[in-house]
Image (cartoon, rainbow, N blue to C red):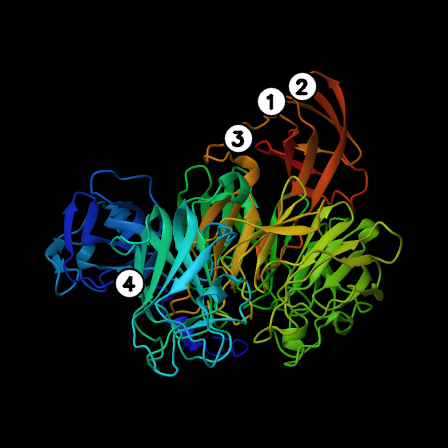
Amino acid sequence: MSPHHGVAPADAMRPTAPLLTESGWSVAASGTSLTIDMHRTDIVSALVYQPRRTGGGSRLIEYAIRLSTDGRHWPKPVATGTLADDSTAKTLNFAAQGARYIRLSATTAAGGRNGWAAGTERISSSSSPSTLASRAAVHLLGDPALPAPSTAFLPVDGWTVSATDEETTQANGRAANVLDGDPATLWHSRWSPKTVRLPHALVIDMHQTTAVSALTYQPRQTGVNGRIGTYAISTSLDGVSFGAPVASGHWKDDATVKTATFTRAVSARYVRLVALSEAGQRGLWSSAAEIRLSGPSDPSRFGSWGPVTGFPLVPVATAVLPGNKLLAWSAYAVDRYGGSNGYTQTAIMDLTTGRVTQRRVDNTGHDMFCPGIARLTDGRVLVTGGSNASRASIYDPRTDSWSSTADMNIARGYQAMTLLSSGEAFVLGGSWSGGDSARDGEVWSATTHTWRRLPGVPVASAMTADPRGAYRADNHMWLHATSQGRVLQLGPSKQMNWITTDGDGSITPAGTRADSQDAMNGNAVSYDIGKLLTLGGAPAYENAPATRRAYTVDLNSGSRPTATRTGDMAAARAFSNSIVLPDGKVAVFGGQETPVPFSDARSVMTPEIWDPATGRFTPLATMAVPRNYHSTANLLPDGRIFSGGGGLCGDCATNHLDGAIFTPPYLLNPDGSERTRPVITSTPPSHVALGSTLPVSTGSPVSAFALVRSGAATHSTDNDQRRVPLTFRQAGEGSYELSIPSDPGVALPGTYLLFALNADGVPSVAKVISVG
């Protein structure tokens, strides 16, 4: 691996979720399916599939995973996907939930052979024999105890809590402290004048019967004694009779917030948490800073997640393509990087069918890991530098082909790119690879397919003050193209800069981003014409606390951008991804409170959405899989969002070769059914000129139209996405005339998704058009 990354942290080698004990399990194979009966209901969050390493037979390639509580009723798959055809173990993740039966179905095997190949092997020494795919091994992972519930917390108003014992003599360790909203106060089991031995119990009385599906535990924030290790949670309607545990397990000995998912949602008035051991085995104490309960969510408020889709690689970079497809790639290998190998593993997901196909791209001599990306005027994807630091390649979705273009003058990795209003592509920064020279600006010509230097655009003016120097300080810049070939570099440095790209180019200060510090690995996204939101990031690339702060940057107030602090996110984030929606709101996914490459520690699992009308963030339904370093996200033509990836550290537990599609609240009713969408009934031309009028017909009244540019994302950066709300005139019932902006600095030339929105803000499925 590159020395810039160093060694993956120790926690990258450990699965987030515990390996479930296989004692008492049985397994049966039938045709193309393998069914595990755990003979008990337990929380399951992943299936680990180890293909056979030697010998004949076939490996599982395409798969589906279903869960059942009774072995008779099998809902829709919780996970589907495509695996890399190699011998490495595959962790197939899905949303943690209670089940007794787990069914793994092979839809395609390597070599085109379906079904489970001959050979008998036990799942474990205690299980019954079974026919497995090519004598593969299959294991299950339990509750990952990730730090946020999959639904909103229930309000604690009117709740009370009691404990079997509490420390009140030498400290204020009352049970009531776990509901006061202050993590600085805590409940502690009694230690004076005499310690009360384990177990200890807390009982929350909600004073009304409520549906509950999870308990969140925040350990004490000062000191370590009493962190709960082994626990059991049960519920009651009367406070006297408590049933069998709805959750049990062992929490790690650290200060992070932990969630126990119930094996089923239950109606209860009382919830009892029993501490059976101290996490660090330091003594006989128990403690808790805060306890919260959560219940089934309202999809119309929080949205919902689809099944996890497995990829044959870690999707480190992604781009939405015409034809309802998603392009993804990793590096020379599907799960690791290093060197300059001259080829790249790619995959394409068909968003209509969910099927993922894999291809290795050799013909460009380009390992496209850690690149710059720009979407060209004609919809092609320009990819520059990375592991092969001077190379540049172009993907053409019209022909599904890759080709080379001229090498850059300056070798780069981790650089930033954007298309210019002129149709050229601008690149800046990128000291991750390619030697020690300054990564000053240069421009690619769409006419000559060559690069020209911009000596007037030195990179030093746009760098952060990262303590580790240039190769961390000029990475992943936030670039926003405007009129006349100009670019606003608005981060991650706290200093903003205007850049011109004609002639030798120039770079001049544009003021600071209000009171923001440097925000490396944060995000910037254009949500309206000349208006951008920046959020998150950290003062250094890694091992520095991230921020919760967000800022708006307005380019419409004169020559000097106006930066203003808006509402804070609920969680600090770096390595997150942000997506602008058709209605102008911005959703942010994943990230860490302290950025550490390849680690899932301190992951932020609950996305948030920012509303420009209020300046506030609100929570969304929680993800099933952490999305941190090397994750990505994209707006899809149907108004949903793809979020995937993370990892790429070889033999580690934090490789996430998968993704999932999020359905935002604007598409859902409270019962989870889809809201009625407006429909664009006409077929727009494939290309519209700047300054033209576009006639559009709809099947029902609409109140707004918006163009959202198709972007390409990697390393938390997508400089291509922007939203352009359109002015329009209603020409008749269901007939509208849309005004396309005349300025290419507003409607940056390229491929756009055209959405119609009704009065409730529900978007149509987009029409794909080329503008410019």
Q: Nearer the viewer, residue 472 or 610?
A: 610
Q: Are marks 2 and 3 in contact (CB under 8 Å)?
A: no
Q: Which numbered circle lies on residue 675? A: 3
**Can I make out residue 334 in this image?**
no
Q: Which residue: 75% across, 61% down?
A: 490
Residue where numbered disc 2 is placed: 734
- For the residues labelled 4 and 1, the Cα–Cα distance comes to 49 Å
Callout 3 crowding tier (Cα within 10 Å): few <14, some 14–19, many ≥20: some
Q: Amino acid at mark 4?
A: Ser
Q: Which residue: 25% across, 62% down?
A: 20
Query: What element does badge 3 sit on?
Result: loop
Residue where numbered disc 1 is placed: 681
Considering only order in the chain, which callout, 3 or 2, is on the residue closer to the N terminus? Answer: 3
Query: What element does badge 1 sit on?
Result: loop
- 315 vs 480, left or right, is left
Q: Position of residue 226 (x, y in %)?
A: 39, 76
Q: Are marks 1 and 2 in contact (CB under 8 Å)?
A: yes
Query: What element does badge 2 sit on?
Result: loop
Up the image or down, 60 lies above or below 682; here it is below
On-image quarter of the C terminus: top right
Q: Are marks 4 and 1 in contact (CB under 8 Å)?
A: no
Q: Nearer the viewer, mark 3 or mark 4?
A: 3
Residue where numbered disc 4 is placed: 87
Up the image or down, 18 lies above or below 755; here it is below
Q: Amino acid at mark 3?
A: Arg
Q: Amino acid at mark 1?
A: Thr
Considering only order in the chain, which callout, 2 or 4, is on the residue closer to the N terminus? Answer: 4
